[in-house]
Amino acid sequence: MMEEEEAEESPPLSPSVIEGTEEVTPPLSVSPSSIRVTEAAQDGELLTFIIVSQKLSGTGEYHVDRTYEDFDWLQQHLFSLEDVPGIQGIIFPPLPARAQQNAPVKLVRQLGLLATGETWTPYCRALEAYLQQVAGHSLLSRTQHLETFLTSPEPPGRQKVKRGLFNRLSQAMEGIRKDGHTKDVDDFFRTEREHNLSLTGLSRAAAEPVSLNTAPLSLLLFQRFLEVVQTEQKIAVACGHFAASLQLCVEAGDDPGQETFSKMCVKISEIMESMKKNVQKVAENDVTTLGLGLDLECRYQEAEKEMLFRRTFKLVELETASRNAERAKPLKKAAMDEIKKAAEKDFDQVSVVAKQEVARFQRARVAVLRQALVRWCELQILTATGSAEQWNQQLLAFRGPARGPEPSS
């Protein structure tokens, strides 16, 4: 993992970049940009994440430990904020899938780059990004549950949270998906929905392999990058095995030929071990920069798709209320008109919030991927420069010291 940096130097994780505007100051006792998930402690199958955040007063830090169930508790509380006008129009920060040791193939596909490597560092960075995004959101940051999650020394309650409106919408949204409800009264959302569907046509959790002909661009790019990282990790393992095998060829003895051969094996083993560390570093840089940026892009595209379907459901509700009002008998006409007005007001509120969220998201995604790509290039150059210098030293050592002129008799 890269050394901890300030938020503005950690491209995929900056809440102000995710929001697409200057960082707001939510009514929290911590600074959103200071939130860090520093490590993951494993006890059997249980993962506990250490979360550190800076107090706004500047007098110290909060240190809390949370499990994935606590993160899910927070997410469900955010979904249950039904009293917030236009809440269905929010693109909720996406929570990564649950991580576990020896995960099944389906879960590994869901986690993608977050499941690579031998440490939980990428997963901690993804959870860190999630918390920073929630804390930096002008609406979501105002819930007391977020304050409790970040500052309370005791874990939040493990009772199940009512999923509220979002649970009631799930089946209806699935019906809309199946029916292919695509008409929209607003060209902005019709165009955005088509654009989003072109990027998220397939789910990363799908069991089938990705087809070059049918996969959306973002998914295809993400999976190809994941394949590159996995290949780099396999190369590093192969270099380590080769280095260890060469050490087995070293034998002690008086035979000059055997002694020379043993020295060559030791030198080549050192070179292969150096190559292993280099490739490991390249793979690590891939994951912690561009990899996290692409992962966040894919998950946010899915979150936007869910928001657009929620708005579509509100549109269907409005259309139904309008038809009922038109067909209502005189005795029920007034009541049906009131229901129509309420549905129209609700739909308008959702549309206003959704349009703001989409505009902010489109600005932010460009900035996040640009910064992730720049940071990736910088680390690639830095790693390549250091490796070239190290390999030059290895080459000089392998050749041996230059022999001077023979002494005169």
Image: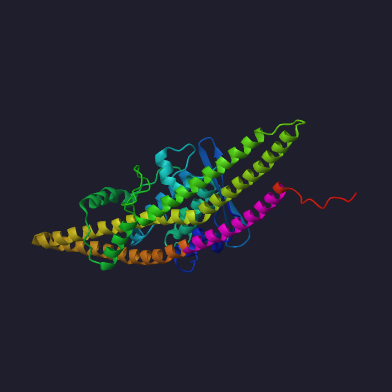
Left-right relation of 40 to 255: left
Residue 19, x across and y down, in percent:
44, 64
Most distant residue in the bottom direction: 22
Q: Along the line of sight, which residue is nearer the eye, 197 or 8?
A: 197
Q: How many marks?
A: 0
Q: Position of residue 395 (x, y in %)?
A: 68, 50
- Above or below — where is 253 with respect to 93? above
In this view, 359 is above or below 44: below
- Give 114 or 404, whichever is nearer the viewer: 404
Residue at point 52%, 47% (across, down)? 232
Can residue 307 be seen here? The reply is no
The location of residue 143, given as percent across then percent down, is 44, 57
Q: How is the image coloured?
A: rainbow
Please tell me whether residue 257 belongs to the stretch shown in magenta.
no
Q: Is residue 378 magenta?
A: yes
Question: Could one spot residue 144 in this view of the protein?
Answer: yes
| Main secondary structure found in the magenta portion | helix
> Start and end of the magenta stretch?
370-397
Residue 110 placement: quadrant: top left
Residue at 21% from the left image edge and 61% from the top image edge: 183
Up/down of 263 relative to 141, above or below: above
Going by the picture, which residue comes out furthest to the front?
Answer: 409
Q: In the rendered image of this protein, does residue 102 appear above or below residue 335?
A: above
Give coordinates of residue 135: x percent, y percent. 48, 59
